[in-house]
Image (cartoon, rainbow, N blue to C red):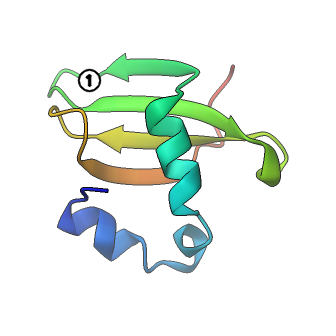
Amino acid sequence: MKTTKYFQATRARPDRARIKDEWICHVVEHPEREFIQADGRIRRWASIKEMDERYLRVVLLADGETIHNAFFDRSFKP
C-alpha cells in the first residue's frame, strides 16, 4: 500500500489509528461512490460493516494508487 507522508502522520492520531488497512483496501478496490477533485485527487467511499455501516472516505493521489487520507466521513449521505 503506497501512502503519502501526510497519511502516515495523520494515521498516528487516536481517531485514525483504529482504521484497519484492510478497510482502506476494501474502499480503494470496491468503492460505492467516487469523485474526482479539481486537483486530480480521487475520493472513494464505502461502508464498513464492522463499524456499524459508517462510511470510510479514502483520498488517493491522481495516480489512483497512493493513499493520501482515510477517515470516517460523518457528512457522507449514501
Find numbered disc 1 in the image and state the secondary structure of the residue it sits on.
loop
Q: Residue 70: percent from the left, percent from the top?
A: 45, 52
View extreme (right): residue: 52
Residue lying at 38% horizontally and 70% vertically, measured from the top left? 10
Q: Residue 71: percent from the left, percent from the top?
A: 52, 53
Q: Is residue 3 left or right of residue 56?
A: left
Residue lying at 36% horizontally and 52% vertically, measured from the top left? 69
Residue lying at 78% horizontally and 53% vertically, measured from the top left? 51
For label 1, count other residues whose C-alpha is less than 10 Å away and answer few (under 14), some (14-19) or many (20+): few
Residue 64's place in the image compared with 68, above or below, is: above
Q: Is residue 47 left or right of residue 61?
A: right
How many discs appear?
Answer: 1
Residue lying at 31% horizontally and 63% vertically, measured from the top left? 7
Picture quadrant of residue 60: top left
Of residues 42 and 74, which is closer to you in this image? 42
Q: Residue 39: percent from the left, percent from the top?
A: 14, 28
Q: Residue 3: percent from the left, percent from the top?
A: 25, 59
Residue 10's place in the image compared with 35, above or below, is: below
Of residues 20 and 8, which is closer to you in this image? 20
Mark 1, residue position:
37
The three-letter code of the residue at mark 1 reads Gln
Picture quadrant of residue 78: top right
Q: Quadrant of the N terminus?
A: bottom left
Of residues 12 and 24, which is closer to you in this image? 24
